[in-house]
Image (spheres, coloured by chain):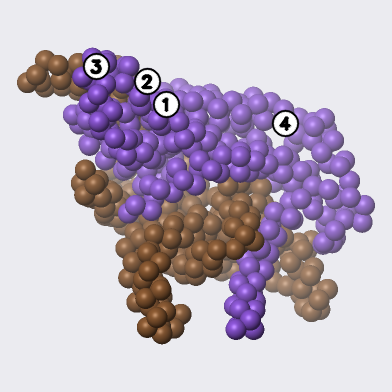
Amino acid sequence: MTSRKLLSEAKLWLVAIPVLLWTLIPIYHIFLFSISTKDSAFSGRLWPKQPTLHNFVTVFNQDHFYLHHFWSQIWNSLWIAVATGVITLAIATCAAFAISRLKVRGGRTVMNAALFTYFIPAAFLAVPMYKAMGTYGLLNSRWSLVLAMVTIASPYAIWVLKQASDKLPWELDEAARIDGATPAQLFRLVYLPLMVPSLVAIFTYALLLAWNEYLYAFLLLSHENTIPLAVGLGHFLSSDDSPWELLMATALIYGLPPAAIYYAFRRYMVGGLTSGAVKS
Amino acid sequence: MSAIAIPHPPLAPKRGLSTWQTWGLILLAPYVLVFLVFVLYPVSYGLWLARHPESYKTLFEDPVFFTTVINTIFFLLVAVNLKFILALYLSGFFVHERRWIRWLSVIFIIPWAVPAIPTVYSIRFMLNPEWGVVNSLLFRWFQIDGPNWLTDPQLAMAMAMLVHIWKALPFWTLILMAGRLAIPKELYEAASVDGASAWQKFKYVTWPSMRTLYVTSTLLSLIWTLGDFNSVYLLTGGQPADKTHVLATLGIRYIRLDQLDHAMATIVVALPFVLPMVYFMMKRLSGDEQKTS
């Protein structure tokens, strides 16, 4: 019996080790480059001869041609991510409340329109969106990226919030209505407090989506004062002798916040975001 | 853009109801506005731009387009199916109740949680034929010269598929895992009592309860993989000689060349394939709604 148990345990490890390596190698490679000198990085070593933090110093001091706008790019990324999170949350919360609790006429049609947007591949929507942003005169303004990301994030946000809202007991609304509550009071005093976990999940979702976005960012923003860090990283490869060790140090700084935020809010994210997806 | 107006509600039969309906419309208005301004108008205008038959003629005559279509079909068929077979298998691994497996699942999510550009660039350098770690290890350990991973179009496409799978696998594993966890444990216990083998348990218990979820997820992933710009663009940039494009990157390439009607035509070509699936998915989710309410 114990040997059989050992065997099944060994089988699990036989899956676990390749999975671990597969997941971590590209990430370790970023870390490795960020603490290596250029020579060491290009020699294919698995651990630098002399690990150094010099790359990070160079990045923070903006001490390279590609890094002259590092801090302003981080600021842009942050600004765009927070604005997207706030606006998406506001729009989606109101829409989900109207559809789910107020049973507004046409709510179903709007939900379908939102789902349509959600299912269309983002890269396909990018082409007409680019043209439209040009027409609106928004190209090269950070707002263009914020509004594009709100457009992409809100359908899923509305859907998840609607699913969560549908689960709230209907008796609460009836009681509130009998007591003479206005819709605004119902929204503020009943709906919002009960929805907090889903609201946290949706805010985080929209925030990360905007921070991580590359395609829309590089299409809509090209002026050096408005580009976020993702686009800045993209510029690194415009020449042949790119400073890969600096690129990877910057990339590590760029990738850490979303990973940290994801793990900080994982409790909300997993419950809040997969519940909807699994239903079908 | 002043032409956009929120549709007025028809007069409600009861007066009390109409304040609630008015509030509903007010709260719905911001999203409706976003949809009209940033989805409906751009898409309609884009389709209007793509109305000329000449755009399609030049598009079909562009040799890059033909290669791109072949690439896209291969990318979808291979990457999506491989990803889902792996996800189905790994979801069975991750449902084991062990503390260390829970920790592993936390690590396993990283590729999905972090942005694409750092990790894809990292893989790109690993595959660099001269300085990348892959070829230098191949040489150090086996004394063989590794291939030019990213300058051979077929190999480069295969690598782009790997990048896509690396990034998207955790999410779908999570989804299928939730599907597995929803299967009542009693079914497995009963099967064990009847002396079912692991394969029989999968065939008669797991698969029948997961089939719908599996098919729906595969379809959804098919549509989204079609829009996967990052895995291809950040790895190869469509190079060498524009031989590693997929439809998503080709559309953007035409934008960069300032040929917007060709960019739109590229997308319109994919619509007969995309729209039925989108419609099916919408029906599926709306249908669910009817059942619950």
**Badge 1 vs badge 2, beta-carbon distance below 8 Å:** yes
**Tag 4: Cα neighbours inside 10 Å, few (<14), some, or many (≥20)?**
many
- Observer-nearest residue: B209 or B234? B209
- Observer-nearest residue: A85 or A7? A7
Name the spot of residue A231 as percent of width and height, x first: 62, 37
Chain identifier of the residue bearing label 3 in the image: A
Residue at x 82%, y 61% (from the top left corner): A46
Residue at x 52%, y 36% (from the top left corner): A204
Type of residue at label 2?
Answer: Leu
Compared with A260, B284 (above or below) is below
Whether residue A126 is visible, yes or no, is yes
Quick one: label 2 or label 3, which is nearer the N terminus? Answer: 3
Q: CA distance from mark 2 to mark 4?
A: 43 Å
Residue at x 79%, y 47% (from the top left corner): A34
Question: What shade has chain B been given?
Answer: brown
Type of residue at label 1?
Answer: Pro
SS of the residue under disc 3: loop
Q: Which residue is mark 4?
A: A70
SS of the residue under disc 4: helix
Q: Nearer the viewer, mark 1 or mark 4?
A: 1
Type of residue at label 4?
Answer: Phe
Quick one: label 1 or label 4, which is nearer the N terminus? Answer: 4
- Observer-nearest residue: B144 or A206? A206
Q: CA distance from mark 1 to mark 4?
A: 39 Å
